[in-house]
Image: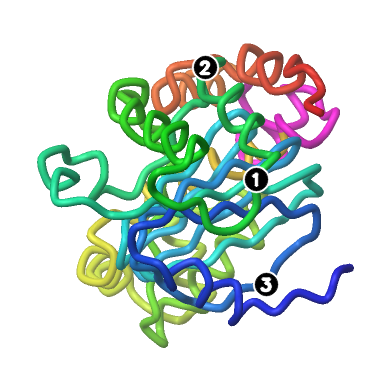
């Protein structure tokens, strides 16, 4: 693995407020929680990742990109191998406030147009300065993002730093294949259903059952992209004993059937 000075990269990205900063890397990285003065677009080529903010966990699947607004604390975790991770830190403008896209964290499908533009930026590294031809290209890319990014991926998990919630969330994540219920989780942590319900609502503004469903769907998306498991195996491994129930839940959340999503992810042509 390359020896990467993360502090220097973060400093370089924000050093020139009017520049765009481009970074393509082929190694797993381990940034701590951090934030930028620039909006960040990240595309994981040939893999998948999770993005953590202080409030939510976002699953970033294949053929999708992540937009992180300026000032949002976050870090990425790659749970699967990737060919490249391509990141562009876009300069901020007063006009950004006129469109809610630039101020909202989200995951969006990568269109063919955006993919070609992202791959084209591989020839550049570091700061791209105003007045240059590469800057005009980056500016055009930034300007089209709101128009081509109208369907954010709905799978986002809230998270919590509350000392009582952390072990509960960890237990759920480690046992998604089991027939988890509010009763079984309450028994595991010696608490009442009323207390557990209140903890989820007050700390994460979501119900226990909503969290469990989203956690299972996030795990399923990872399996669909990165494994050769059958749909039946994935349903079983995410706590469903009915393929139809699993498929219907997946469709309601993503707008695609698991088989269609699996085919889309595995049919992406190799990128140079």
Segment colored magenta: 224-243
For residue 108: magenta? no
Q: Tell me if 65 is positioned left or right of 148 in this view.
A: right
Label 1 vs label 2, nearer the camera = 1
User: Is 248 drawn above or below residue 40 in the view shown?
Assistant: above
* First in sequence: mark 1 vs mark 2: 2
Q: Give the number of the disc on residue 30.
A: 3
Q: For the residues labelled 1 and 2, say whether their Cβ atoms are less than 8 Å apart.
A: no
Q: Give the number of the disc on residue 232.
A: none
Indicate the quadrant containing the N terminus: top left, top right, bottom left or bottom right: bottom right
For residue 238: magenta? yes
Determine which residue is flagged by label 2.
113
Label 3 vs label 1, nearer the camera = 1
Q: Quadrant of residue 46?
A: top right
User: Is 63 drawn above or below residue 90 in the view shown?
Assistant: above
Q: Give the number of the disc on residue 124.
A: 1
Q: Secondary structure at mark 3?
A: loop
Other-residue count near label 2 (Cα within 10 Å), few / some / many at <14 / 14–19 / ≥20: few
| Front-lying residue, 228 or 122 | 122
Percent x, y of residue 52: 48, 63
Percent x, y of residue 247: 55, 20
- Identify the residue at image location x=38%, y=79%: 191
Label 3 vs label 2, nearer the camera = 2
């Amino acid at each position: 693995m390359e020896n990467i000075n993360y502090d220097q990269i973060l400093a370089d990205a924000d050093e020139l407020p009017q520049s765009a900063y481009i970074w393509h890397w082929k190694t797993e990285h381990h940034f701590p929680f951090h934030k930028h003065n620039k909006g960040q677009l990240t595309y994981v080529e040939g893999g998948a990742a999770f993005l953590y903010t202080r409030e939510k966990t976002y699953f970033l699947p294949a053929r999708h990109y992540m937009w992180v607004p300026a000032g949002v604390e976050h870090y990425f975790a790659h749970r699967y191998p990737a060919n490249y991770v391509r990141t562009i830190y876009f300069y901020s403008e007063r006009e950004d406030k006129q469109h809610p896209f630039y101020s909202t964290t989200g995951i969006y499908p990568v269109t063919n147009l955006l993919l070609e533009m992202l791959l084209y930026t591989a020839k550049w590294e570091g700061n791209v300065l105003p007045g240059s031809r590469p800057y005009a290209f980056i500016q055009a890319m930034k300007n089209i993002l709101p128009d081509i990014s109208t369907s954010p991926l709905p799978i986002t998990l809230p998270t919590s730093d509350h000392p009582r919630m952390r072990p509960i969330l960890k237990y759920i994540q480690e046992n998604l294949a089991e027939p988890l219920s509010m009763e079984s989780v309450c028994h595991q942590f010696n608490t009442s259903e009323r207390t557990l319900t209140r903890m989820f609502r007050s700390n994460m503004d979501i119900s226990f059952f909503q969290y469990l469903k989203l956690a299972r769907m996030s795990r399923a998306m990872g399996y669909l992209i990165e494994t050769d498991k059958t749909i039946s195996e994935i349903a079983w491994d995410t706590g469903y004993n009915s393929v139809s129930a699993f498929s219907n839940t997946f469709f309601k959340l993503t707008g695609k059937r698991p088989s269609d999503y699996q085919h889309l992810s595995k049919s992406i042509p190799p990128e140079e």
